[in-house]
Amino acid sequence: MTQHGTPQPHASAAPPARPVDVAPLDLDEGRTLVADLHEHLDGRVCLRGWVHHRRDLGGLAFLDLRDRTGVVQCVLEGTEPPLQESCVEVDGVALAHPKAPGGIEVRVSELRVITRACAAPPVEMAKIDHLTNADTLLAYRHVTVRSPRDRAVLKVQAELVAGFRAFLDGHGFTEISTPKIVAAGAEGGAHQFELDYYGQRAYLAQSPQLYKQILVGALERVYEVAPVYRAEPSHTVRHLAEYLSLDVEFGFLRDDGDVMDLQEAVLKAMLARVGERCAGELRSLGARLPPLDVAFPRIPLLEARELVRERYGHTSGGKDLDPEAERLIGRWALAEHGSDFVFVTRYPEAARPFYAYATGDGLTRGLDLIFRGTEITSGGQRAHEYDMLLRALEQRGLDPAGFESYLQVFRHGMPPHGGFAIGAERLTALLLDIANVRFARAFPRDGQRLQP
Ligand code: AMO
């Protein structure tokens, strides 16, 4: 029995349970992966994968075989390879071959077709180029997404997300899952997808904002990895109608400085992981990691606008920074601080949603992070007092009734808190120098696209 007043042991402070013995599982039994071929030089191998490319050269057929780890050149005599993208299994011998891509070639003794492709792919997989034919590539995305380039992009993004989770798991955060069908949008009235919910009007969630804040009351530190929906009126290369939002929210912070410290640490951990695990992908995409030993500079929005005007002669339109001003402030951060990142802080109330923490001087503790000249995150400290929120809603002409359960939480003790959200596709695209954010999502949704 615990004596009155003695602190209860915290669940996460308890010793970890003994690991359960799980039988080892080898899903690749009897098969050699392309990435492991160098360990089997001059030995017999059995490969499984897709016919990535094929060509005939006077009695010899060359077949590039692709599996989940890479592509290798295979040479066959006498057998005609099946159509591109057919699934095959080949037996053969792995040989060092300096002229073959990757330095290895497989001399095939037997080829078995696992699944025969019935039609040639609509686009030559080995020759995909994102600068041309964007519409064609997206129209046939179900096949073109198999290209080495697209696969590399998705791999890097998966590592970014895994790095995000790993870092936060290691710092006392709990992963949450919040509704994507909601009664009111958190990010302002426009740009919402409306739907009929059993006869009631509902919307697709623009962000998990209000729910992640509510769950700070339960779990103190939370994060979510989930798609969100924006009925964007503008068709640009940086906007999607559905994107992956990497959301963070945590309680008991001092001010927005803590939000920036956490954000910087998370992003550096994510990028470091990509550096460790995706060297091949980065090389093939010609991408470079930003320097990770440089602190991200921080500049208040009003100073940033002024700086951009004085230094580059650009007057930013609107209350925010326009895209050109973002690009220029990114240029300044690189020139003056050697940083690919820059925080823009202290946004005016008029440029932030009602939940931002207002400091009473017309400004907020809301901030954005710019990476290589484009905004990739928004965040900041939030209003955590009931009256403050009511005032902010009224100021914006929003009906408190639409936010009833959210507002109620602020009557039950919410700590000072804050957080941020990273747009996963924007981060991926900027990291990998992909001009159109659509190519940083497996199946992008935009004003023109609902298929595939
Ligand atoms: P915000 O609306 O600024 O903030 O979105 C956060 C980040 O999400 C990305 N993003 C998009 N990416 C692709 N297509 C879009 N249409 C799109 N819109 C936004 C951007 C952006 O920086 N609730 C707040 C976050 C917070 O304060 O925690 C929010 O959603 O990279």
Image (tube, rainbow, N blue to C red):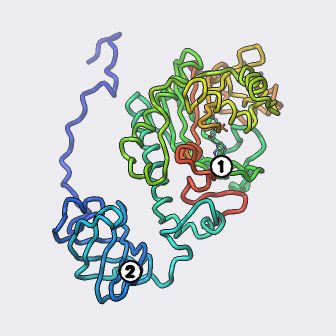
Q: Is mark 1 within 8 Å of ligand 1?
A: no
Residue 99: assigned label: none
Contact check, label 2 and label 1, Cβ < 8 Å: no
Determine whether 302 is above or below 154 in the image: above
User: In this view of the protein, which residue sits in the foreground, 360 or 13?
Assistant: 360
Quadrant occupied by the N terminus: top left
Q: Which residue is mark 2?
A: 115
Q: Amino acid at mark 2?
A: Thr
Relative to 29, say whether 436 is above or below. above
Q: Secondary structure at mark 2?
A: strand
State the residue at coordinates (59%, 60%): 130
Label 1: few (<14), some (14–19) or many (≥20) C-alpha neighbours in 10 Å: many
- Using the image as rendered, state which of residue 356 and residue 45 is in the foreground: 45
Q: Nearer the viewer, residue 271 or 212?
A: 271
User: Which residue is denoted by mark 1 in the rendering?
Assistant: 229
Position in image of residue 25 (x %, y %): 22, 58
- Quarter placement of the C terminus: bottom right
Left or right: where does residue 94 sit relative to residue 84? left
Write down the quadrant of residue 299 in the picture. Answer: top right
Q: Residue at x 48, y 69 (%)?
A: 126
400 is higher (above) or lower (below) than 7 = below
In terms of image quadrants, where is residue 207? Answer: top right
CA–CA distance in space, label 2 to label 1: 37 Å
Classify mark 1: helix, strand or loop.
strand
Between 149 and 267, which is closer to the camera in this rendering? 149
Image region (quadrant) for ligand 1: top right
